[in-house]
Image (spheres, rainbow, N blue to C red):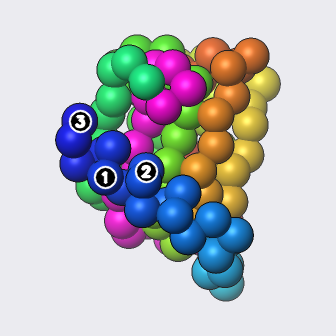
Amino acid sequence: MIRASKRLAAALAVGGLLAVAVPTSASAADGDLTFWSGAFTGQTVTYPDAGTGCTTLPFVVHAELNETATGIRVYESTDCTGRALTFPATDVHSFIGFDGRSFEPVG
């Protein structure tokens, strides 16, 4: 949890520089992807290698820190179907009004 907090602080410190890398094609999400159960509070889970397919989250999430070069899509379902939010590469975002239950990298 301390590691994720340091990453969040570093990401917030660079502010507008977060969204400068845009991948040219879909690939595995190389880099850390961290989720929180609250608005950067509560339970955390970090995926050092998010892979290429659908991943079911261990709890409902409401914030993300994407330190990868690949965008992600967070779904309300546990099987990456239905309603979703899409976030770009190198993004930090909270989404309190949306219950994320699974995610997958997108190109």
Q: What is the magenta range?
A: 26-40
Specify few, some or many for label 2: CA neighbours under 10 Å numbering under 14, 14-19, or 20 or more: some
Q: Amino acid at mark 3?
A: Met
Q: Residue reaching furthest front?
A: 13
The three-letter amino acid code for the residue at tag 1 is Lys
Q: Secondary structure at mark 2?
A: helix
Q: In the rendering, at what x and y percent does residue 103 appear?
A: 54, 37
Q: Which mark is residue 55?
A: none
Report the amino acid beneath label 2: Leu
Q: Are marks 2 and 1 in contact (CB under 8 Å)?
A: yes
Q: Name the residue rendered at 40%, 43% in the picture.
A: 34
Q: Are marks 3 and 2 in contact (CB under 8 Å)?
A: no
In the rendered image, residue 91 lying in the magenta stretch gets the answer: no
Whether residue 45 is visible to the viewer of this picture, yes or no, is: yes
**Mark 2 vs mark 1, CA separation in Å:** 5 Å
In the rendered image of this protein, does residue 81 appear above or below residue 26? above
Relative depth, front residue between 58 and 52:
58
Viewer-nearest of labels 1 and 3?
Answer: 1
**Does residue 71 show up?**
no
**Residue 53, position as x, y percentages in the image:** 47, 47
Q: Is residue 57 left or right of residue 62?
A: left
Report the side of 8 relative to 98 (left or right). Answer: left
Q: Quadrant of residue 12?
A: bottom right
Residue 6's disc is 1
Q: Residue at x 69, y 51 (%)?
A: 87
- For mark 2, what is the residue? 8
Question: Is 75 on the left or on the right of 35, as rendered?
Answer: right
Bin the neighbour count of mark 3 within 10 Å (Cα to Cα): few under 14, some 14-19, many 20 and up. some
x and y percentages locating residue 29 in the rendered image = 44, 63
Residue position for label 3: 1
